[in-house]
Image (spheres, helix red, strand yellow):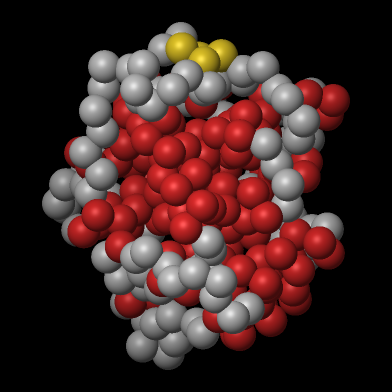
Amino acid sequence: MMLSLRSPGGDFNSSPDSGQYVPQLDYEHLARRSNVLRSLHATHEEWRHAMESFVVASSVPQVQAIEYAFKHVENSHGGEGDYDTLVHMQRGALTAVILAERLGYDVSDRRILMVSMRVHDAGKLNSDIQALLSIPRPNDEQFKIIQSHAALGLTYGAVLSLGPVVQGITGFHHAYKAKDPYGAELTAVPEDLRNKRLEMVAAVADVCDALLSVREYRENDPSRPLVFTPEEAIEKLRAELTVDADILDAMEALLLSTPSAPAIV
Ligand SMILES: [Fe+2]
Ligand SMILES: [Fe+2]
């Protein structure tokens, strides 16, 4: 499927060589405490495509703006920078586009997905949410505030101006939970302009990273496992998400199949 989507800084299909911005990939932060990228049995070709897409998205001004904001936001410890969310979005983006390639999505859709995932938790820049992010077990009221990040993401101009598909992925990335789904009101993005399959791919990659990587909220909770194994992650994804079966099958193959090529991370 070809989607035409333009941002003020140029379209997503521009060559990585065409922009003036040379992104500094922060490999230390990207791979830090992450099992997800090590766990993906992706081919060299899939990794190459994913990294090309990563570089292209790094030249999109809205992605730069959101990432800059996360690097400087005041966090819950009174410090600066929410790297936990920042690198989660980057790892989730790489996972999502590799999964999308397995599912047959073309480069245009994969770049839209990459950009979407790089900003999908933008709502967490909200200061009330930042204050709660490292709490291991938020109470109901606190959890509601954290949950508002999905709908809040839609209110950021940077996300809105990226178009309805990106907006849909940002707003609905928690809307495919089997139990207590949440996210943007269904009227926030016109139904016919959403790409629900891409939203499902995003939802799977999002949860996958959260389960396989060390996240700050679990790190502070000794009663829960720090990370889940790929086998446990697949079991939880199947139990906790209502998405098309072939997306879960493709994720399972990526995590549990014999690698056709070693992962690069
Ligand atoms: Fe989220
Ligand atoms: Fe997320």
The residue lying at 50 percent from left, 82 percent from top is 228
Image position of 191 (left or right of 40): right
Image position of 16 (left or right of 244): left
- 214 and 34: which one is in front? 34
In the rendered image, residue 243, in percent from the top left (x then y), is placed at: 79, 58
- 112 and 227: which one is in front? 112
The residue lying at 14 percent from left, 51 percent from top is 79
Name of the residue lying farthest toward the left: 79
Image position of 63 (left or right of 206): left
Rendered position, 246 above or below 35: above
Q: Please state the total of marks drawn on the protein image.
A: 0
**Would residue 195 be seen by someone viewing this image from the given angle?**
yes
The residue lying at 81 percent from left, 61 percent from top is 246
State the quadrant of the N terminus: top right
The residue lying at 39 percent from left, 82 percent from top is 226
In the rendered image, residue 28, in percent from the top left (x then y), is placed at: 21, 59
- 249 and 123: which one is in front? 249
In the rendered image, residue 26, in percent from the top left (x then y), is placed at: 23, 49
Rendered position, 136 above or below 159: below
Residue 140: quarter of image: bottom right
State the quadrant of the C terminus: bottom left
**Would residue 161 be seen by someone viewing this image from the given angle?**
no
In the rendered image, residue 80, in percent from the top left (x then y), is placed at: 16, 47
Residue 150: quarter of image: top right
